[in-house]
Every structure is written in structure tokens, then in C-alpha cells.
Image: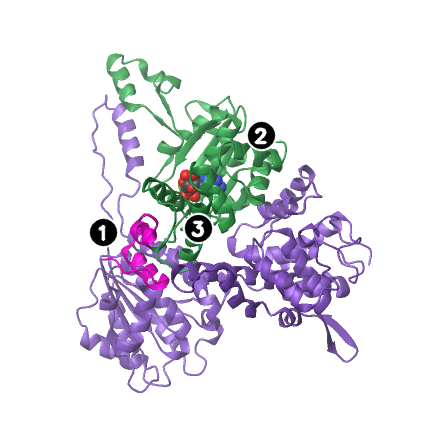
Chain colours: A purple, B green
Amino acid sequence: MTPPSLVDRHIGFIHALRQAGLPVSLAEGLDAANALTVIDLAERETLREAYAATLVKRRTHRPGFDALFDLWFPPVVSGSYDSYGSREDAAPDEDKGNLGIDLERAELPELRDRLAELLMGDPGDPAFREFARAMVGRFGRVQAAAGRQSWFSYAVLRALSPDTLVARLLDRTLEARGGLPEKVARQQIRRNIAAFQEAVASDVRRRIAEESGIEKIARTTVKPPIDKIDFLRVTHAELAQLRREVHPLARRLATRLTIKHKLGHRGRLDFRRTVRASLSTGGVPLTTRLRPKRPHKPELVVLCDASDSVATFSHFTLLLTFALREQFTKVRAFAFVDVVDEITKLFSPGADVLDVISRMAKEADIIRFGRTNYGQVFERFAERYPDAIGPKTSLLILGDARSNYQAPAVDTLKRLAGEARHAYWLNPEPRRQWDTGDSVAMAYGAVVPMYECRNVAQLAEFIETLA
Amino acid sequence: MWFASPDEVRERLTAVDYLADDGISTSVFLAGALGKPLLTEGPAGVGKTQLAKAVAEATGARLIRLQCYEGLDEARALYEWNYKKQLLRIQADDDAWDDIFSEEFLLERPLLKAIRSDEPTVLLIDETDKADVEVEGLLLEILSDYQITIPELGTISAARKPYVVLTSNATRELSEALKRRCLYLHLDYPTPERERDIVLAQVPGLPGSIAEQLARTVATLRGLELKKSPSIAETIDWAHTLLALGRTELDEAAIGETLGVVLKHNSDQVRAAKELGLPARS
Ligand SMILES: Nc1ncnc2c1ncn2[C@@H]1O[C@H](COP(=O)(O)OP(=O)(O)O)[C@@H](O)[C@H]1O
Ligand SMILES: [Mg+2]
């Protein structure tokens, strides 16, 4: 393969970004091209950041961008993998950091020693990535199918087994185990192991791209950005990351619900007009300035489905509720599966949200038979908490509207919603699945406006529609 | 020309104690070279505002700041007529009607001031996400053609384009149109290595070993899912506090005593003490 020209590369790269879901506009593509004319193209990190500054306008798109950049603008080009670091690689003096070890011939114990050393240092050190590349060259090539070989991360990680170095590293850094020093050291080691894994994965992708073409690997490289990950399909590792996304949104939702009630919001503008008008009456203001009314804090009632079918979703709804609790003077929160219980008291100010979620599972009385029963829940709710909803209340329902073929009690919900000032329903299922099987989404949606809310991006959109 | 290269950005910002990485130096360079506004987004206390100040200081430019807030409107952002003065003039002279919408009665607000400035100017539009959405429309207009029309006075064009930095704490998404108009720089909590260097630059006299321990401990705290993760600003406060207390090591006792400097919420302190195995505090 002849290396593509810069123009081809530029166009191919932008095309790949779009395919991966980055909304790169024509104007932004031009900005990037302009940027290329004023920077030193030989400086790879400058090139990366120039593309990022002109094309990547959301933090959540950055990881995918970086993976694609590494494919289109690889740090090294393999000539012969076998003579690592001697002549063919792009940067002539890049193996300085690993001087003294022949990465190509050294025995495993020696390589593990070197890895241990690197894991104690700064993963930004060029020697770190260089070592990862060399290890992929040595251990990453695996029989993929009969007669076909390919590159794999797992083979490298199995050979070097960084995880089994942790104990050794801790012993080396710490005088004694335990307490804060160990926590801090572990954090550092964990971060560096993750950086090593990522460096290996990146080089594996580069080598596959060299052998089978960039486009092929590019398509499978980029995971959806975190705000597009389905609430119902979140992995454990993504949970913590997602929690961080939800918190500011809840704050925003609270402001939105509050702003809706504000009057005289543009008070200052009226003032200007008043004064101008007064000029025509010789400076006598005929109308007085209206002060903006104090935003009055509405009450919020949250009803959330805590059944297993929406376990990860309800994790978010609780988080949302928790954050809303800090913003509203009066929030009452209720959780349900087939019976409903008030969980407001768990959300006391200053409580820890993860504690609350685990306490709720133990303390709240929300399950009798274990299958969600919306109809029964609405009826019980109306009976047990007749004064929960008043004319100032915003009612927020969170759930998938799957009622296990029980009577839905739509009229009861209609009455509850009618008593509230506003009512909204957020459903974590894709709209096309509404009303399939035991879903009564459309019937409920007819009495309470229902929004598809499958990911953080949609939650953000919902909040913006409230403006 | 604001800067000759990303390397020069790095050098000149370092000279005013602001440490730039590749992302910062490249985007700051490009904003000058391409004449585009730079939008920096990220959590509170990671150096967004300081970056604009550092650019102004490093280049000897004038800094004009528009602080955004809910309810900010044109009268505060752009210009306003000085009605008191206008009233006085009218009361003194009934025939002054034609005069009172002139330069003399104009109150310049930051955006107009920056457009009219004829010396090199850094315009900092701070915490843009706090303003209402309509303000974004206004900004977009001004950042597109760098001119302002005042009906009574006519159109005023920028004598020289200011260097514009917008910041946002990302409490909401800014509009796509505004983002497309800007270069984008996401600032986040730094790596411990970088944070150590930042703290050393900001807190003269701090021993390197403490800076190192601080940076690593703060990184650990950020891993804990707190209500409010400590920012660089808080790491710096922490360093000042330890220095003032004459501490030479960041051991558990020192941390227990000063944790309130970095963690402002009581529940965060409790959580951190529990997770890190610190002696409980009352
Ligand atoms: N890269 C950096 N170099 C030097 N100091 C920094 C850097 N980043 C942040 N700081 C310090 O952190 C403090 C907080 O930064 P600030 O700009 O106020 O945060 P933000 O505007 O992002 O909320 C500043 O006072 C500055 O001293
Ligand atoms: Mg700031």
C-alpha cells in the first residue's frame, strides 16, 4: 500500500468521523483544513489537537476521535516488525527510554520487570507507548482462523499479565500496607495499567489497519459516546461514568421546572422602555418598573419504577430524584414495583446517593409478588397519598409502562395528572417497542405526555423542551 | 499575530505561571492565527477563566470581561443609554431631543467596549452557560461579523478583532450554532503529573514531595464519586493551607485536619473518610 497523500488522509479522516456519529459540518471541515496550513504537520500531537479544536465540540466525542486519529495518523509505520526500534520506525530516537533492554529478544521476566517500572512512572512518557508497541509486535500475533493470522490485545495482556504485578508494585512503593497510602498507590497503578491496555489496543488496531485497510477497522473501533449509551444496557463499568453525566442534568431540570413559573423575567428591558417612554412625558414615569418576581419553588412528586426490568434505568431515576431533591423545597419521591412506598425520607439533605440506592432496596416496601403492576400502583398511590399532588405540583413518572397484562387504571392516572400543574412521563424503551407485548405506553401517553428517554442525550433534550 | 506557534504559546503562558499542555497551546495558538473565538468547557476550577487572563497578560493585551448570569440582557452586555443624564438634559433644555442619543449618553458594556477597543484586546465571555439562551443569539451575531448596530448611532465595526475566549461549566449544552462558530477546548482535571507542576508553579515555596502527594491524593479523591470533586483551585488552596500550617508531609493526620479545604460538602467528607480509611471526624 502506498501511503495516502495528506489531502486524501484529511478527507478520509473527516468522513470516518462523520460515520462514527460526529456532526462535522462543512464549515468545520474548512476550519480544520485552514488550521493545517498554519501548524507544523510533523508535530503529531499538534496535528491531533488542531483537528480536535476545530472538529470535536463535545467531550463525549473525544475518545472516539482519538481512536480514529490514531488510525489515520499512526505514530509509527511498521516496516519490519522484527527489528523493532532500529531503523524503520518514524521517530528515530524514540527508544531512548527503553535503552538497555533489547525489547525484541529479552526474556519474559525481564520484560515484566520493565513493565513494572513503567507502571510506576508517567504513562505520558514516550517510552511507555513504545514498550506497548514492541510487546504487541512480539506477542500480539495470533492464529485467528485456519490459515489466517491477526492481532489481538488479549494475547499481549496474557503474556505480560500486568494485573499480577500489582502486589509487587505495592510492596515496592509502600513501607506498610493499608490506609490512605495504599489507596493512593492503587489508584496510580490502576490508572497506569488501564493506560497500558489502551496503548496495546491502539497498536493492535493500527496493525490491523495496516494489513486490512483503515475503513474496515474504523467501523468497529468507535463505541457510542457515553451520552448515547442505552440506560437499559449499561454495563457496570459505565455506570459510574453515567452517574457523572446525570447530576448536572438534574440541576438543569430543576431550573427549567422553576423558570416555567417565573413572571416578569425580562424586567430590566421593561425598565428601559419605561424610561424611554417617560422621556416623551417630560421625564415623568407614568408606569413603574416591575421587579421580577421571586422564582417560586414548585413542588415535585417523582414516581419511579424500581423493578428489575428497568434496574439500571431506575438507578438513574433515583439519582435524578436525588439531585432534584437538592433543588426543590418540596420533593416527595415514591418507588414501586407492584406496591408503592414513599422513599422521600431516604433522600435527606446531605445523604450519600449510593447509600440511598442500596438502602432503598432493603428498606422500601415496594414488592409483593415481584411483577410490575402499574394499575394497582396508581390506585394505591391515589388512596394512600391523596394529598401528595396539588395544583402547584409537577408530577414526574419514570418507567417502561410494562404492566404484565394487569388492568392499567388509566382513569386514575388521568385524575392524578389532572390535579397536578404539569405531568411528564419518561420511558426508557425505544418508541417502536411501545405498545408491544404488555406495554400500555400509548394509553398512558394519552393522559400524561410521554417522552422516550433511553440515554443521557435524550434526557437532555427532554429538559430543553421544558423551556 | 497573537502567537507564532503552539510552542511559543506554551513558553509565554509558562512565563505568567500558566502551564499549557498540547491541547491548550494548540487551540490558543489557532484561535489567534485563524481569528476564531475559543470556547473552553469543563468543570469549575480547572483554569478556564485563568487561561483568558493568562493570554491577556502574556501578550500585554487589555482584558475585557463579560460575566454571564441568568437574566443578563443586551443592556448589560452591549450598551445602554444613560437615562439619568438624558433626563437631566431634557429638563434643562427642551430642544435637546436630538442630542440625547449621542455618544455622550452612551454607556458602553463589555461587548461594545471590546469591539471599539483599538488596542489588542482579549474579550473574556465568562460562564456563558449561565446566561439565557437568547444571549447566545446575540453573541453569535457579534462573533460572526464583529460589528454592532445601534439604531441611533449607526453600525460600529471592530477596529481590530478582539481575541475572544468563552467559558462554560457545561451546566447545559450551548447551542450547536455557537459551538460551530468557535474552536473548542475541553479542560478537565489534569493528570497527577501535570497537577503537581501546576501546584508548584502557583505555590512558591511548596516542597516538591508535598506537591506530588497532594496531586496523587486529589486524584484518588476524584475517583470517589463525590458530590463535588476537588478542582485545581482547591488543590492549590490545600497546598497553601499545608504550607501555612508548616506541614512537611501529607500524612493521615494532616489530611484529616485539612480535608475541609478540598471537600466542601459534609457528606463528601464523610464519604472520603470512610473510603480512604481516615480516622472519623465529628
Ligand atoms: N494550567 C494551569 N496553570 C496554572 N494554574 C492553573 C492552571 N489551571 C488552573 N490553574 C489555577 O486554578 C485556579 C482556578 O482556575 P479558574 O480559571 O478560576 O477555573 P475555572 O474558570 O475553570 O472555574 C486558578 O486560580 C489558577 O491559579
Ligand atoms: Mg471561571
In this figure, which residue is indicated by the disc labeled 2?
Answer: B2
**Label 1 Cα neighbours within 10 Å, binned few <14 / some 14-19 / many ≥20:** some
Q: Which residue occupies the extreme front position in the image?
A: A175
**Residue in front for this viewpoint, A194 or B169:** A194
Circles 3 and 2 in contact, beta carbons < 8 Å: no
- When asked about the image quadrant of residue A183, the answer is bottom left
Q: Nearer the viewer, mark 2 or mark 1?
A: 2
Specify few, some or many for label 3: CA neighbours under 10 Å numbering under 14, 14-19, or 20 or more.
some
- The subunit carrying tag 1 is A
Disc 3 target residue: B213
Q: Is residue A202 above or below residue B94?
A: below
Pick the front one: A180 or B273: A180
Q: Amino acid at mark 1?
A: His
Count of numbered labels shown in the rendering? 3
Give the image quarter of residue B253. Answer: bottom left
**Distance between mark 3 and mark 2 Cα atoms:** 37 Å
Dot 3 and dot 2 within a common chain? yes
Magenta residues (range): B253-282
Q: SS class of the residue under badge 1?
A: loop
Q: What SS does tag 2 mark?
A: loop
Chain bearing mark 3: B
Instruction: Give x and y (percent) for residue A17.
Output: 63, 56
Residue A97 drawn at (x, y percent): 66, 52
